[in-house]
Image (tube, grey):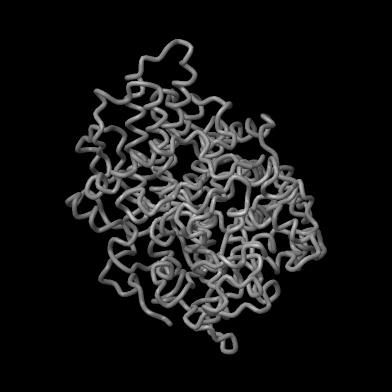
């Protein structure tokens, strides 16, 4: 396990290059101030620029989650989570109800992703300013491949958020590039071409727990991007028959053009499997920080508190053991964090905490009354947080129904349910809600939950503060600063489940089911859909999975509108009153209508529409004059 380090990332260089990011992006997110006449001049310059490109992910994951963490957003927008939080936490509720607080509410990731695209493009254009030696050719290709891959990845996320946007592939922006590009026919071909370039240029030596992309990472994301394009834009439906459409590619270094077929995508995923470089951890709980060995030791010392849920684990499978946790054997790609956050990294408040996994704070327990904050008698082994984005009743109820139905004809227990969610009424019997809590389901996220130890109760320490090598909270605020759990962007189970979905071969899905201790079933699309939901809940995948299974012509009976609307009528706790639950209702109309009206896209920032002077158009379903699109106070 890697503690507090971002491995090969040049942290200081990344932080320095990041400082001008917000200024650079205020009006036109495509310009850089460093001229290609002087930069890069040496290999270290290329490495630094790539570090700054990767650091965009830290900024999204380490800042205000309700303002810029898109993976958190996609869970809130799905049927996995409610908005919840306190009365004042309105941004997260607006996301859950698919409405907006202001016309620029979603501007931050728009700017950040274009900033990452600009940095990657700069590396692509200037990499040969370096006088590469012959023996450095493979390194040159690796770094160039990483730049191509990251540009494709950032465009994937940007287009999933906003749909048709300008396609900027050069630091010299032509009038044509300033126009809004069609995502289906222009942006996705570029996304997949960039990822193919990355696959063909990168090797397989880097990228194992060091935060870098490699060939296998590119192959996995090629599948994810292709499946979204085929499902959402081409309405391909079930792909197991092998009838998915081919997509034309762009000729560029590392990509010879031509087309990418479903068979090509499958071959890439099988290449990952046959490499033997990744394998499932034996115990699903090994992936999450609540299984750390310090907490395991407390469960076996016979003194004080004991977290029984991990007591039956093997100690060698604990989160902080070799091959587990951060840098584990099934982790392909992730956002890494370290003890380097500061209140003064840059002029942007959201950038200051970029190396702390701030999603743990947002999903953390609100801890009932103020008197309970930090009291392990009420929350052990979990720590306090903002209590936003609580798991929905729907995910617990749907999961429980699946267990009762019996995948092989008999009832079963899926370890992943309790390994992913905290059942507050049964795990934290003395827990009470704040008097301003909203949309409480009775559950909390366990995967990324803040974890404390009995020994750390007095100071709200996280468990990290008691590990070897810890030197003090970088923010002088352990509750906010000490969160170094990787945020997974691609795990090996995703490779296996995508393979089953693309081929109809259940052997890959069965490996995931077997690890969870659930019945191994034959292929069906519903079985894959359920497995993806259970395996990856709270990891940012659910909403876009729902969208690709729906297509771009949704009706009330389509997958996403139907699943979202099923939230209506669920019994929730509001204002701390557990005795008088309320029925969940949509803020302005219905979830199905908001989804159908928007097709799952967010509103483009009005500032960008204005500065583009008509070249950028607002997405359907986001007319600010329509009250159905605007936040409304419910509680």
- Count of numbered badges drawn on the protein: 0
Q: Residue at x 26, y 37 (%)?
A: 32
Q: Quick one: which residue is furthest to the bottom in this view?
A: 580
In the picture provided, is 231 more to the left or to the right than 103? right
Tell me where residue 299 appears, x and y as whole percent: 76, 61
Would residue 562 be visible to someone looking at this image?
A: no
Q: Quadrant of the N terminus?
A: top right
In the picture provided, is 318 more to the left or to the right than 120? right
Would residue 180 be visible to someone looking at this image?
A: yes
Tell me where residue 568 appears, x and y as whole percent: 52, 76
Tell me where residue 157 appears, x and y as whole percent: 43, 47
Q: Residue at x 76, y 46 (%)?
A: 316
Q: Quick one: which residue is furthest to the top in this view?
A: 134
Tell me where residue 413 appears, x and y as whole percent: 77, 63
Residue 581's place in the image compared with 495, above or below, is below
In the picture provided, is 518 more to the left or to the right than 160? right
Q: Quick one: which residue is furthest to the left in this view?
A: 613
Q: 515 and 508: which one is in front?
A: 515
Q: 212 and 4: which one is in front?
A: 4
Residue 188's place in the image compared with 100, above or below, is above
Q: Which quadrant of the figure has residue 422? A: bottom right
Q: Residue at x 52, y 39 (%)?
A: 221
Residue 14's place in the image compared with 565, above or below, is above
Q: Residue at x 49, y 18 (%)?
A: 138
């Amino acid at each position: 396990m890697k503690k507090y380090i971002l491995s090969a990332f040049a942290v200081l260089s990344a932080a320095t290059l990041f400082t001008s990011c917000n200024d650079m992006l205020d009006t036109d997110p495509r310009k850089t101030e460093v001229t290609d006449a002087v930069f890069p001049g040496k290999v270290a310059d290329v490495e630094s620029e790539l570090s700054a490109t990767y650091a965009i992910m830290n900024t999204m994951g380490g800042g205000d989650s309700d303002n810029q963490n898109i993976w958190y957003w996609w869970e809130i927008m799905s049927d996995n989570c409610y908005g919840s939080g306190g009365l004042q936490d309105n941004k997260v509720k607006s996301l859950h109800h698919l409405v907006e607080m202001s016309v620029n509410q979603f501007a931050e990731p728009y700017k950040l992703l274009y900033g990452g695209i600009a940095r990657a493009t700069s590396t692509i254009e200037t990499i040969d300013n370096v006088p590469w030696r012959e023996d450095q050719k493979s390194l040159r290709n690796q770094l160039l491949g990483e730049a191509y891959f990251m540009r494709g990845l950032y465009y994937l996320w940007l287009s999933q958020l906003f749909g048709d946007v300008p396609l900027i592939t050069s630091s010299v922006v032509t009038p044509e590039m300033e126009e809004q590009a069609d995502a289906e026919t222009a942006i996705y071909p570029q996304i997949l071409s960039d990822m193919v370039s990355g696959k063909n240029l990168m090797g397989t030596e880097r990228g194992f727990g060091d935060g870098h992309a490699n060939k296998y990472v590119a192959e996995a994301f090629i599948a994810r991007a292709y499946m979204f394009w085929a499902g959402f834009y081409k309405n391909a439906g079930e792909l197991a028959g092998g009838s998915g459409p081919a997509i034309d590619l762009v000729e560029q270094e590392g990509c010879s053009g031509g087309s990418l077929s479903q068979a090509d995508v499958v071959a890439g995923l099988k290449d990952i499997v046959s490499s033997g470089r990744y394998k499932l951890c034996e115990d699903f709980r090994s992936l999450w920080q609540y299984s750390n060995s310090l907490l395991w030791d407390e469960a076996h010392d016979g003194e004080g508190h004991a977290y029984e849920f991990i007591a039956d684990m093997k100690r060698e499978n604990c989160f902080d053991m070799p091959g587990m946790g951060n840098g584990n054997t099934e982790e392909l790609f992730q956002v890494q964090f370290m003890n380097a956050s500061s209140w003064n990294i840059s002029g942007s408040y959201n950038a200051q905490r970029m190396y702390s996994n701030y999603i743990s704070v947002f999903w953390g327990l609100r801890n009932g009354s103020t008197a309970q904050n930090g009291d392990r008698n009420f929350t052990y082994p979990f720590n306090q947080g903002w209590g936003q984005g609580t798991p929905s009743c729907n995910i617990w109820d749907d999961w429980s129904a699946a267990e009762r139905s019996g995948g092989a004809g008999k009832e079963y227990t899926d370890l992943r349910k309790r390994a992913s969610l905290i059942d507050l009424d049964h795990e934290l019997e003395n827990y009470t809600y704040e008097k301003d809590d909203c949309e409480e389901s009775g559950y909390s996220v366990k995967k990324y939950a803040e974890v404390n130890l009995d020994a750390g109760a007095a100071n709200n320490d996280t468990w990290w503060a008691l590990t070897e090598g810890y030197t003090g909270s970088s923010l002088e605020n352990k509750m906010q600063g000490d969160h170094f759990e990787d945020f997974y962007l691609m795990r090996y189970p995703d490779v296996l489940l995508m393979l089953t979905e693309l081929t109809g071969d259940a052997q890959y899905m069965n490996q995931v089911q077997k690890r969870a201790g659930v019945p191994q079933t034959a292929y069906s699309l519903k079985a894959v859909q359920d497995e993806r939901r259970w395996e990856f809940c709270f990891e940012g995948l659910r909403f876009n999975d729902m969208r690709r299974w729906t297509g771009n012509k949704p009706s009330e009976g389509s997958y996403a509108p139907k699943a979202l609307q099923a939230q209506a009528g669920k019994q929730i706790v509001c204002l701390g009153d557990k005795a008088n639950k309320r029925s969940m209702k949509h803020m302005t109309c219905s979830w199905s209508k908001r989804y159908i009206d928007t097709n799952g896209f967010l509103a483009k920032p009005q500032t960008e529409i204005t500065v583009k002077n008509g070249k950028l158009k607002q997405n359907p379903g986001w007319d600010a004059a329509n009250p159905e699109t605007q936040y409304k106070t419910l509680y």
